[in-house]
Image (tube, helix red, strand yellow):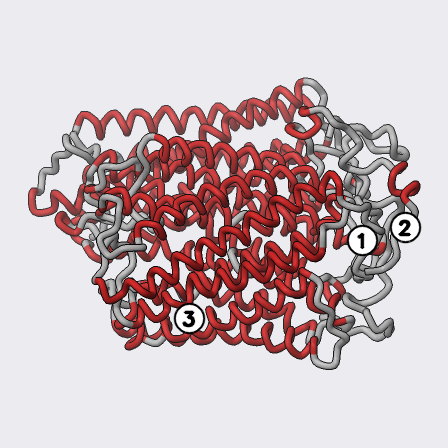
Amino acid sequence: MGESEATLAVHEPDLKHHFDDSAQQFQSSTLGMWVFLVTELMFFGGMFGGYTVYRNMYPDAFASTSHFMNVPIGAINTGVLIFSSFTMVMAVRSAQLGQKKVLIAFLIFTLLLGCVFLTLKYVEYHEKWVDHHIPGPGFQYADTRYFHQAQILFFLYFAMTGMHAIHMIVGAGMLIVLISMAARDRFTQAWYTPVEMIGLYWHFVDIVWIFLFPLLYLIGHTK
Amino acid sequence: MSTYLPFARTEARTNYLNADYGWKSWLFTTDHKRIALLYLFSITAFFFVGGAFAVGMRVNLLTPEGIFAHDTYNKLFTMHGIIMVFFFLVPSIPATLGNFLVPLMIGARDLAFPRINLLSWYLYMIGGAIALTAIVKGGVDTGWTFYAPFSSTYSNTHVILTAIGVFVSGFSSILTGLNFIVTIHTMRAPGMTWGRLPLFVWGHYATSLIQVLGTPVIAITLVLLGLERVLHAGIFDPAVGGDPVLFQHLFWFYSHPAVYIMILPGMAVISEIIPCFSRKALFGYTFVAISSIAIAVLGFLVWGHHLFVAGQSMYASMVFSLLSFLVAVPSAIKVFNWTATMYKGSVSYETPMLYAFGFIGLFTIGGLTGLFLATLAIDVHVTDTYFVIAHFHYIMVGGMVMAYLGGIHFWFPKISGRMYPEGWARFAALIVFVGFNLTFFPQFILGYQGMPRRYAHYPPEFQVLNVMSTAGASILAVGYLLPIIYLGWAWRKGPKAPQNPWNAKGLEWEQSPTPPPTYNFETQPVVTEPAYNYSGESEEVGIG
């Protein structure tokens, strides 16, 4: 659209030509983001649905796999993500208050926590590789009774955590964009919509992990 | 038709078409109307690609022995289905007429997210290019349903590439739906309450709900299918504990609601055409509006009727059967209300109305045969026969394509600023109707007599009906080529359209110039009356 706002009357700087006012624009962005998160929910929902069906079919095999998951790393990562949600909230708060430096600091902090998560996830994936727990021709499983069924679980494990990790990487990329925008003074107290929207996305990705952790790591650890 | 406005006024004005002519002004446009035209030309191209595969199938079925090898025939029906479903029917009305008209009808200057709208067209084109690449490289033979474990393990064709194409184009569908939902919620003009929204907008709102809720599920299903094809971990392979029926559940969780993506916008178009050419307010506005939402909601609860013979639990099948009957209720409400609208109206027979008549008749046949298929015992008899093929072509082609053509003719003056030749258009509408029925009605009989779908050969006793069907298909092809020719001619040489050639109600005709300027309205539109106020009464018939 080339931001050709010259033809219309006085404009707030970040108001697009087709909106009446900033309130309408913000309302649209927010609703759009929530609708997008609903699509994400359905996207992950397909995998959660598949997980539910197979866990119901093969409860013992699924439980047996959680002894091969790295629970300490999973737990640390859960903590890392919950903490990153907190720093993200603080970033949104500082954007509201117009505190540029604090905003950048919290965004960088959030980004670093995201990187910690992804690094630990890489360590875990490498472990799975060494243990031959990658589904496919090289798959091995200690309990031969459950060979095929455990392979299905590991298939779901990689599909679900892999999709989650891709979302984390996208989120990290968007955090970098936000940091650069904040550094170039693009945000004001009146307009910080991208921070708020990416914040919503970040929380969603965190919440997905909150469900993945017990379903994939903890189901076999009952007394 | 009413009188033409003097040429001078239409000629001098700047509109969205003559605002700029460079190729960049099209490929980088964020104007919803130009994006609608980009979509219009692309989906028309895909329609003829998909149609070419259908021609191949019908030619093969002229004789019991066929002319193509079995593998070739498998690819023909697969690629016909994939192109027609994912690259024509799903985007057909929403991405073209919906994209063009939703902002105009609610009095907005554009969709809420113009750049996302353009992105959706690019995703569609990328997805389409990937699918076409797969076709050129040798095609795919799984059926458009990609059923596992054939697709995940045994097929030697380009399953993954095709799935990637469908996956990418799915996001274009999601983004269109998201854009419509947000636009309809936040960008209505003053006075445009929910109870005054044109039913075209209600229909697109319901469609968008399905696009947003359903499409992500097919996306993840195709991801799982692709991963399984690479890894062979057995997730859908019953030999090693996988569950192929799970694939069918996931697939139809999207793909059944998706058939409502492929009919609700058609109903939306018909709800505009009928009041206009009956000169009457639509009968039972509230019921028709709510029935769109009811179809969207119920449509998510009936997917199991595709699995009656797939080993699904009998009790689940009974519930799905009951729910499938229920979804017929809101569809019937629409048909009854359209018919009641025409009662004592001053009905005229312009081309859009002819398509609307065709839609009502053919959709009713398609819908009623759907009830046969929702009935457990009959479904066992006709599952995977030509009865099913005939049923859903009556909905998809007899319904949606008819509505699409009707809508294209109805809004052609708005879109192009020109009038199409009425005589040729009526002739083409008649040809389409005759050709369609001759193509697909024999297939009901074939299916009921037991001819299975997806076979290249058939017993000789089915030949007469198959020849009739192929003959009908060639008539239908003429009916589809004619509009391309005369609409293409009218776009350049047709007489200038007046502001409101049909004397229709609605913001797009009454308050936006024809053709519209880039930001749609010269002054802020204000709505002061209910939709379809053809009688000029001032009373409200609204919802909440």
Tell me if I can see residue B431 in this picture.
yes
In this view, the mark in front (2 or 1): 2
Spatial CA distance of label 3 from label 2 is: 47 Å
Lateral position of residue B408 relative to residue B3, left or right: left
Picture coordinates of residue B96 (x, y %)? 62, 46
Q: Earlier in the sequence, mark 3 or mark 2?
A: 2
Q: Residue at x 28, y 29 (%)?
A: A124
In the image, B354 versus A42, the foreground residue is: B354
Q: Is residue B90 above or below residue B303?
A: above
User: Label 2 sits on what residue type?
Assistant: Leu
Q: Is residue B291 above or below residue B238?
A: below
Kind of element beneath mark 2: loop
User: Label 1 sits on what residue type?
Assistant: Ala
In this view, the mark in front (3 or 1): 3
Q: Residue at x 53, y 45 (%)?
A: B173
Spatial CA distance of label 2 from label 1 is: 27 Å
Q: Which residue is mark 2?
A: B5
Spatial CA distance of label 3 from label 1 is: 39 Å
